[in-house]
Image: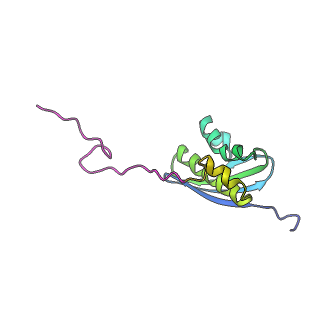
């Protein structure tokens, strides 16, 4: 392997209407999401702990740099897509992590999406208030 060549593990994660492409490289633990630091990009601390969960479970915090491109959805869906993509990239880095990630539910795709609105109703299931008179 040449000196300029780095190991890069790429993976894709999806959640709701968000799609995330992740590139894991050995480094000091930087997380760049759409050109911003992860702490700047995600508004809630809970989302940041959520996306770092795969690295924490496999004892890899500070060992990999994460570069992510996320398209579509809101912050919650984007964080879920990023978490899945990081977990999948870690499995590509080492097959040993698969058992730990699977046990913590980090490789399972959360396929829940918003139910479509039905005609004649206010939302997907909400109806207008019934009036006797």
Is residue 63 toward the left or the right of residue 127 in the image?
A: right
122 is within the stretch colored magenta = yes
Rendered position, 4 above or below 48? below
**Residue 86: x %, y % from top left:** 66, 52
**Toward which corner of the image does residue 95 lie, by quadrant?**
bottom right
Which residue is found at the position 29% from the left and 50% from the top? 118
| Residue numbers of the magenta segment | 109-133
Answer whether residue 6 is visible to the viewer in this image: yes
Which residue is found at the position 63% from the left and 54% from the top? 85
Image quarter where the N terminus lies is bottom right
Callout count: 0
118 is within the stretch colored magenta = yes
**Magenta stretch: dominant SS?**
loop
Toward the top, the furthest residue is 133
Toward the left, the furthest residue is 133
Which residue is found at the position 57% from the left and 48% from the top? 80
Answer whether residue 35 is visible to the viewer in this image: no
Q: Report the coloring of the rendering.
A: rainbow
Toward the right, the furthest residue is 3
**Residue 109: x %, y % from top left:** 54, 54
- Which one is nearer the viewer's eye here, 68 or 46? 46
Image quarter where the C terminus lies is top left
**Residue 25: x %, y % from top left:** 76, 56
**Toward which corner of the image does residue 51 lie, by quadrant?**
top right
Is residue 64 toward the left or the right of residue 36 in the image?
A: right
**Toward which corner of the image does residue 21 lie, by quadrant?**
bottom right
């Amino acid at each position: 392997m040449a000196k300029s060549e780095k190991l890069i593990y790429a993976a894709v994660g999806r959640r709701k209407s968000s799609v995330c492409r992740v590139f894991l490289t050995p480094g000091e633990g930087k997380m760049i999401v759409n050109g911003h630091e992860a702490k700047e990009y995600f508004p809630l601390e809970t989302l940041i702990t959520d996306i770092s969960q795969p690295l924490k479970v496999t004892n890899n915090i500070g060992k990999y740099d994460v570069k992510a491109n996320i398209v579509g959805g809101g912050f919650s869906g984007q964080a879920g897509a990023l978490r899945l993509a990081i977990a999948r990239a870690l499995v590509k880095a080492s097959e040993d992590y698969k058992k730990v990630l699977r046990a913590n539910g980090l490789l399972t795709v959360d396929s829940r999406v918003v139910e479509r609105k039905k005609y004649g109703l206010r939302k997907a299931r909400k109806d207008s208030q019934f009036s006797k008179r």
